[in-house]
Image: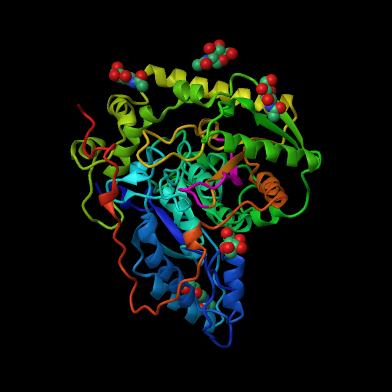
Amino acid sequence: MRVASRGPGGLTIALSAWLSISQSPAWALLEPFDVREASIDSIHMALFTGMATCRGIVSSFISRIEKFNPIINAIISLNAESLSTADQIDLQIAAGNKTGALLCIPALRDAGSIILGKANLHELALEGISVSSFGGQTIKPYDLSRTPGGSSGGSGAVIAANLAVFATGTDTVNSLRSPASANSLFSFRPTRGLISRAGVIPVSHTQDAVGAMARNLKDLAVTLTVMSTIGYDPRDDATADIPPGVQGKDYSASLHGASLKGLRLGLLDGFFNYNPSAETTPVNDAMNIMVSQLAVAGAVVVNITETTYNALAIAAALDVQSYEYRELLNGYLAGPGADGSPRPTSFSEIYESGEFLVLPSQYEYVKSSAVSSTSNSSYFTTQRGIQNLTQALQTTFLANNLDAIIYPEQKNLAVKIGSPSQSGRNGILAALTGYPVIVVPVGISPPSKDAPIGVPMGMEILGRPWSEGLLLNIAKHISDLQPVRKMPPFANQTVETKSYSAVPVVTPNTGNIPTAYPMGVLWR
Ligand SMILES: *[C@@H]1O[C@H](CO)[C@@H](O)[C@H](O)[C@H]1NC(C)=O
Ligand SMILES: *[C@@H]1O[C@H](CO)[C@@H](O)[C@H](O)[C@H]1NC(C)=O
Ligand SMILES: *[C@@H]1O[C@H](CO)[C@@H](O)[C@H](O)[C@H]1NC(C)=O
Ligand SMILES: *[C@@H]1O[C@H](CO)[C@@H](O)[C@H](O)[C@H]1NC(C)=O
Ligand SMILES: *[C@@H]1O[C@H](CO)[C@@H](O)[C@H](O)[C@H]1NC(C)=O
């Protein structure tokens, strides 16, 4: 089923090596630039000082992709234009041209970035295992026996392994935050409406969001700044809510100043699993250490024990995907495709094709989507319930005078390959209320046979609507408390940069799909 890899943007993931240029070196010296843990700033520095060319940087990433992608099966295709685009940028540099920074889905391109390729994601972004009929199973770089989180698991694995600078993705319940958490990355899920979702294969108008993940907060802030420049977009009515003063904000400026001292952070007690086990204890230990460090830094951590905050119960009662999915997908597929290639034209065509992949734990959800719509009377009641939840969250903020709320993204480590689902995730609160979240790495579990340096874990920092700047500032101070991020062991080595005459073709491995997920099965 090819729909997951097609469409304008779709739910596919663009790995963007960000290369906006603002100065011209007079010479082009070609010492190889080490792209490991490279940031936008370090790449710009290399370009502006003539230490690297854009072609050289793109070639370095492609060389790493050729060497390491077969281990993690994270990339489904490379952009054949990336090297020629790099050459154009090198010519621009030579001509002293400063590239602008603006707008929309080509916004990234307009800002000078190069789309390296597309990453695997869970089939139609519907779960967090990151297995798809088109891309096979993506493997966690830190533990080859585990999933990389998801649905944007390919993006997370790619950025963790230093195969690109940052990645974009969508998040309907957990899809950016789970791979960020599982791969020692930072991510943002913006306030509903901040970034237009036009062009993305939809799942839920209520819950979908577009965001990104990166290895450091500066890159994340710059990415958010460019992605949010689009502002009001008539193709996504949620963007009409953007308040004055938010559009055009430079979020990298938010990383400076202030401190944790005196901040009031709510800790959602209901978003933990206190049953001790090898899967849950590392998360609880890492959060305990974080809470102590926050206290030492002068923040006040307020224990929020209200029973409202039970992620499983909230999802069971209020998740509206099955009402919205079929109608939205049909609308999307009725529109023109990105490149005119044939594709399914409806929800039914996909699920009657016999070529799709749905996890058995989701058969009921997809079957329910086939017969449900926003006309169901229970849809109206559920939306009222979401309003109540949003009101309760706002009351929690006000009653406790909170600046932000924290909790682990996942109550347990990212699950093993072949598991029934990516269980234990807490993304539903932001997904339903539309409140923004920044994920920061919070720790790495003790090493084990399968995980030589341990399994990364992340923490969500949830704020009030349009508080992305504050959240980034808090995230910066939290990440300064102790460096958490580490490279996956296999990726922490240099790779000789090849000289390419053309971008090589990457073919995803679909032969590794676990037998627990039979293809084409749903209707029995
Ligand atoms: C600079 O490059 C951009 C992008 O290729 C192009 O659109 C623009 O016309 C160029 N500006 C100048 C002054 O050459
Ligand atoms: C929060 O309160 C609950 C219930 O009293 C308790 O079990 C938990 O340990 C508390 N958490 C913290 C971090 O104090
Ligand atoms: C929506 O209504 C249809 C038709 O009555 C029903 O089959 C379906 O279960 C309802 N969906 C939900 C999520 O309640
Ligand atoms: C929402 O809250 C109101 C007032 O507290 C209550 O009457 C109503 O039953 C709640 N609705 C849902 C769907 O939870
Ligand atoms: C890479 O490996 C070196 C040597 O083992 C280590 O010191 C360094 O911290 C690693 N870098 C990252 C980012 O994990």
Please report the residue visible at 37 percent of the width from the left and 27 percent of the height from the top: 323
Quadrant position of the C terminus in the picture: top left
Can residue 326 be spotted in the picture?
A: yes
Is residue 438 magenta-colored?
yes
| Residue 79, image quadrant | bottom left
Foreground pick, 313 / 275: 275
Give the residue at x 28% y 58%.
339
Q: Nearer the viewer, residue 98 or 316?
A: 316
Assign ligand 2 to one image quadrant: top right
Q: Is residue 424 above or below residue 20?
A: above
How many marks the image carries: the answer is 0
Q: How is the image coloured?
A: rainbow
Q: Which percent across, then down, holds residue 455?
A: 52, 46
The x, y position of residue 257, in whole percent, is 77, 53
User: In this picture, is 421 found above or below 234?
Assistant: above
- Whether residue 39 is visible here, answered yes or no, is no
Name the quadrant containing residue 507.
bottom left
Residue 108 position within the rendered picture, expressed as x and y whole percent measured from the top left: 49, 60
State which region is magenta: 434-452
- Relative placement, left or right, of 340 versus 476 is left
Q: Is residue 369 magenta?
A: no
Percent x, y of residue 183: 51, 50
**In this rendering, would 18 be left or right of 510?**
right
Up-down relation of residue 397 to residue 12 (above or below):
above
Q: Residue at x 49, y 32 (%)?
A: 424
- Horizontal side, residue 501 vs residue 453: left or right: left
Depth check: give the residue in front, 226 or 176: 176
